[in-house]
Image (cartoon, rainbow, N blue to C red):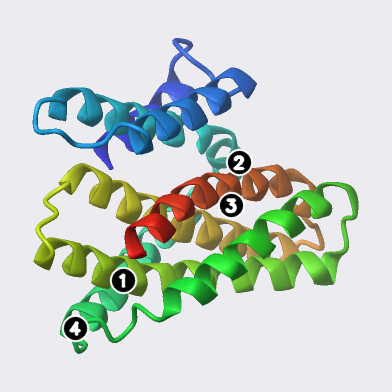
Amino acid sequence: MVSAAAGSYIHLYTELLQANMLTTLGTFGLLLALISTPDNGKNQKLRLSYLLGFALLSGLGLGPLFQMIIAINPSIIVSALIGTTVVFVSFSISSLLAERGRWLYLGGTLLSLLNTMVLFSFINLFVRWSFFYQAHLYVGLFLMCGFVIYDTQLIIEKFHMGSKDFILHSLDLFIDFIAIFRHLLIILTQKVKKKNGNHITSIIINHEACLYTLICFTGIGKREAKT
């Protein structure tokens, strides 16, 4: 989280690096590098650097969204962060307290829905229907809440099976947290803008398309881990 915050700070307050297509490709590259580099006990520093780099560029990617929100109402960011923390902690605790393996059956449903969301995110780049976008936004939020429950129990199950790959486990939970945060940012911003009679759908759709594509890549790893 600190690395992601640093990335956002770099975009907002310095000229060292700005979010663009190259940094987006870099985010995908580091994610693929981390997923494709199995833990062998000797490459922990390398894989940790991949994770920190991915988090940094993910935060950098939030920079343009932050810029827009700060111009509207900076308190939205704080509210979204608090809301994300409450949601994430609540669903994580409920998963930890649930019977072991109870929610693992959600994996297939969540991954299928995720693939559908990726498809419709790209369709929405060209066919921008307001009702469709709103439904997509809220379904996406509930989807990511489901992933918090699923990922938490999957990590527990992996641990009982001998897996101690905390780096990959951190990646899963980090992406879940950032996804919920991004959704809440958009939802809260839309509510503020609607009071003024404005809409921001066209500005934010690109963020969602990239978000679901990133999650889809990690979803491949989750599917393999489950099997």
Q: Which mark is residue 212?
A: 3
The residue shown at (51%, 54%) is 182
Counting residues from the start of the chain, the first of labels 2 and 3 encountered is 2
Please tell me whether mark 4 or mark 3 is closer to you in this view: 4
Q: Amino acid at mark 4?
A: Arg
Of residues 37 and 92, the one nearer the viewer is 37
Residue extending farthest top: 16
Whole-percent x, y for residue 111 in the image: 53, 66
Q: Earlier in the sequence, mark 2 or mark 1?
A: 2
Label 4 vs 3, first from the N-terminus: 4
Q: What residue is rendered at 25% in x and 25% in y?
A: 49
The quadrant the N terminus occupies is top left
- Of the pair 17 and 80, the residue shown nearer to us: 17
Distance in Å between CA atoms under marks 2 and 4: 46 Å
Query: Callout 4 environment at 10 Å: few (<14), some (14 to 19), or many (20+)?
Result: few
With 5 as the anchor, is 161 left or right in this view?
A: left
Residue type of the residue flagged with mark 2: Ala
Q: Which residue is mark 1?
A: 86
Above or below 109: residue 30: above
Foreground mark, 2 or 4?
4
The residue that label 4 is drawn on is: 100
Where in the figure is residue 171, as x and y percent of width and height?
A: 31, 46
